[in-house]
Amino acid sequence: MRPRLIHPRPVLLYRRKGATDIDPDLGAKKRAAFEPSVKMSGQVRYNKWNAMTPTGGGNDPVCDGHIAFLREDWLREGGKVGDEMELAPDDSRLIVIEVRPAAHYAGQAWHVHVMFSRRRATR
């Protein structure tokens, strides 16, 4: 038995190219380059929405929410911290700040929770 996503919705993943963000000549940040988008299916959960919510403590990440993806889909597409995502119907721009395993069953994690921030995206 595999855990499934309950209410999946389309998510576009923009993978960041390269690892350098600093222009070697000017010493200033360069505009990030991205690969073409990849369409994935994920389940979105917001921690807060237009409200003042106190942050958690300890192991809780300071983020605006997470998207649950099937682990095999996330690994196949090669997503990582620093990539950007776009929610298809409303064009929300999200930045990946952390990836955690989730939905443990039969000795392995079947999902990943991709924590995101709604900071200003560079794409």
Image: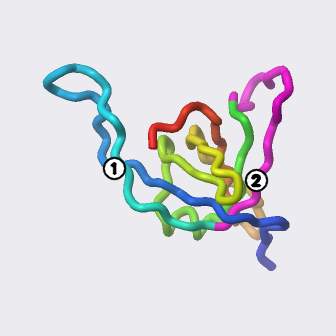
Label annotation for residue 78:
none
Residue at the extreme front: 90
Which residue type does callout 1 highlight?
Lys
In the image: residue 52, left or right of residue 104:
right
Q: Whole-Å distance between the Cαs marked 2 and 1?
A: 25 Å
Displayed quadrant of residue 47: top right
Give me the residue at 53% from left, 57% from top.
13
In the image, is residue 114 above or below residue 28? below
Per the image, the residue denoted by label 1 is: 17
- Describe the element under mark 2 as helix, strand or loop: strand
Q: Residues within 10 Å of mark 1 (few under 14, many from 20)?
A: few
Give residue 101's position: percent from left, percent from top: 66, 53
Give residue 5's position: percent from left, percent from top: 78, 67
The answer to whether residue 101 of the structure is visible from this angle is: yes
The answer to whether residue 109 of the structure is visible from this angle is: no
- Residue range of the region highlighted in magenta in the rendering: 41-62
Give me the residue at 34% from left, 46% from top.
33
Residue at the extreme bottom: 1
User: Is residue 59 in the magenta section?
Assistant: yes
Give residue 3's position: percent from left, percent from top: 79, 70
Which residue type does callout 2 highlight?
Val
Give residue 75's position: percent from left, percent from top: 52, 64
Give me the residue at 72% from left, 35% from top.
64
Label annotation for residue 44:
2
In the image, is residue 94 above or below residue 76? above
Magenta: predominant secondary structure element?
loop
